[in-house]
Amino acid sequence: MSISVEGEPEADYLPPSDAQVGIDVGLKTFAYLSTGEQIDNPRFFRKQEAALARTQRRLSKEHKGTRQRGKRRKVVARVHERVRWRREHFIRQEVALLIKQFGFIAVEDLVVRNMINNPKVAKSIADAAWSSFFAHLLSKAEEAGRAVVRVNPAYTSQTCSDCGHRQDMPLSVRVYECPSCGLVIDRDHNGSKNILDQALEAVGRQGRFIRRAPPAREPWGVVTKLMIWVKYPVPRRQGLRQTPHAGESVGHFLPQHVF
Ligand SMILES: [Zn+2]
């Protein structure tokens, strides 16, 4: 339950959490967390998709302008509505759980991950679910005082999360087997760990207040607008102060590739 006080959005913040997570969305499971947990695709994704295809097929068989066609169109609209409602319900539920548990959440910027252009994996419902998931995650994180960092999705699947070795990982390969260090790990679990690592690197691994979203034209970076304490010791060699001033921005400390 949240108490809201006029003029003080902080009233909605959840109690602080040091827990961190990287999230990799996929097709086999809805998402894999760097903690090793998985969020399964709800079974209704498939079912609803089939229902949608069926009603649309029926609609296309009717001649234009007939009453029957009008009826069919209404059925299609109803199924669409139901799909959307159930999907949003699922997403709200999952986002609420994530936000409650984790204070620092790392995700990929999927806009540039061209999964959707691959016809083999183009699943309209999954696509819609991901974009809705990210949008909802960002807005809820902001309300709750959580940090969300989007990272460059390049190489999150190809890189070994233990030793940094890189290899090709076609989508059909479900397990990452590292020839260099011997790590054997689920493909998406490996990805989620890389996503978290990259995000932590992006904020410099130093205990810092992170500030503001970068302008919309800049794809990566810290996307919640809040000042959030991230607990990491500041390495001396970087010559940064150990204790930042309250409200200080660290935007200029972020590596260039992040912004
Ligand atoms: Zn390795």
Image (spheres, rainbow, N blue to C red):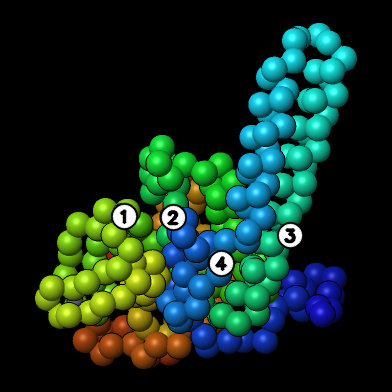
The vertical placement of 52 against 188, above or below, is: above
Q: CA distance from mark 2 to mark 1?
A: 22 Å
Q: Is mark 2 within 8 Å of ligand 1?
A: no
Residue 115, given in percent of the width and then of the height, sits at 40, 46
Disc 2 is placed on an element classified as: loop
Q: Which residue is mark 4?
A: 40
Q: Which residue is mark 2?
A: 109
The vertical placement of 12 against 76, above or below, is: below
Residue 225, given in percent of the width and then of the height, sits at 58, 65
Q: Nearer the viewer, mark 4 or mark 2?
A: 4
Q: Nearer the viewer, mark 3 or mark 2?
A: 3
Type of the residue with mark 4: Asp
Q: Which residue is mark 1?
A: 172
Disc 3 is placed on an element classified as: helix
Type of the residue with mark 2: Asp
Chain-order first, disc 2 or disc 1: 2
* Residue ID at (51%, 73%): 38
Mark 4 burial class by Cα count in 10 Å: few <14, some 14-19, many 20+: few
Residues tagged 2 and 1 counted as in contact (Cβ below 8 A): no
Location of the N terminus (image quadrant): bottom right
Type of the residue with mark 3: His
Residue 33 visible in the current orientation: yes
Mark 1 burial class by Cα count in 10 Å: few <14, some 14-19, many 20+: few
Residue 254 visible in the current orientation: no
Name which quarter of the figure residue 256 lies in.
bottom left
Name which quarter of the figure residue 140 lies in.
bottom right
Q: CA distance from mark 3 to mark 2?
A: 23 Å
Q: Which residue is mark 3?
A: 89
Q: CA distance from mark 1 to mark 3?
A: 30 Å
Mark 3 burial class by Cα count in 10 Å: few <14, some 14-19, many 20+: few
Chain-order first, disc 4 or disc 3: 4
